[in-house]
Image (cartoon, helix red, strand yellow):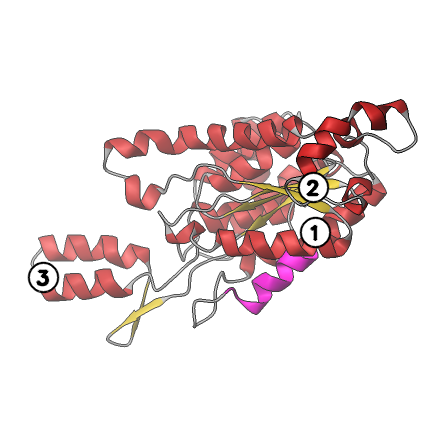
Amino acid sequence: MKRRSEEITGRKNTGKWVERTAARTMLRAVRFTDEDFDKPIIALAVPHTNGTPCNDHVRALGDLVQQAIEDAGGKAIVFGTPVVSDGISMGTEAMKYSLVSREVIADSIEVMTEGYRVDAVITLSGCDKTIPGALMPIARNNLTGLTLYGGSILPGEYNGKALNIVSAFEAIGAHCAGKIDDEELHAIECHACPGAGSCAGMYTANTMASAIEALGMSLPGAASNLAVDEGNAISAEKRNDCARAAEAVIALLKSGLKARDIMTRKAFENALTVAWALGGSTNAVLHILALAHEAGVELTLEDVEQVTARVPLLGN
């Protein structure tokens, strides 16, 4: 399974093993052992930040996936990426960096997967641009790998009513219209987002997570599993996703399947169908076209219109 990483670690009983002695010396300093040099090296992209609830728990997810990779017989190299929150940045100069961050995230992951010649990759994601950004480099370089969504946030609650981030935006309008006072506005602000996880609705994050699951590049069911439980600990379902992701990437390595074997034109039609059936974010068009481009699949706005014209709206 070490189809690429032998360039870094060498192969025993060959001249390459001698040549790569200095590289292994440096890897031993970061806790690689003799046994680890025989294992496939798997990149693990962990876009963690405490700057948004969408990715606040991703470091914990990364620890779980790293351990699962080791348990499954691989050796993980872990790294981070930038994260820009649309919900926080919108309406300010900061929003100009949001879409650009998608490309920076993709490029950051590519730098690490190619810079270490890893055999496979698992990329985590949470906030909007991290989701397509986490998959684009896998398609671009036709890597063996998959992506895992961090999961949606739990609903907030105030006066017996379920809240989410949109409740806060609506409260601004209600306050401006004189329908609620300062105290109620503050209460909604304090209760709408109770912990970690992506915005609770069919916005860009949940739309793209669902579409990528249908595309075949994430685990079945993973897009629906919540980020954390009522105690704000990683949910049991998401913990299971972490273990399954590691097992799946090892299975992909053994089979020799790569991204473009999965990301076919038909797979993109499946992704579009799910996004439309769920009444998802219009940003899906932007990101699915970008993913198709990276996968070498010809897909245009006209194709999107043709494919989705026959899709009924099943959820809103």
What x and y, as percent, mark residue 25?
71, 33
Q: Quadrant of residue 142?
A: top right
- Residue 77 vs residue 89, the one in the foreground: 77
Work out whether residue 189 or residue 161 is closer to the camera in this orientation and state it. Answer: 189
Question: Closer to us: mark 3 or mark 2?
Answer: 2
> N-terminal of the two: label 3 or label 1?
1
**Numbered label attached to residue 107:** none
Residue, far right: 13
* Label 1: which secondary element: helix
- Residue 191, can we see it? yes
Look at the numbered discs 2 and 1 and tell me whether their residues touch, using CB distance below 8 Å.
Answer: yes
Q: From the image, state whether disc 3 or disc 1 is nearer to you.
A: 1
- Image disc number at residue 42: 2
Disc 3 designates what residue?
A: 182
Q: Which residues are magenta?
A: 234-244
Check the picture and name the quadrant holding the N terminus: top right
Q: Is residue 95 above or below residue 65?
A: above
Tell me which amino acid carries mark 3.
Asp
Asked if residue 13 lies left or right of residue 90, the reply is right
Q: CA distance from mark 3 to mark 1?
A: 49 Å
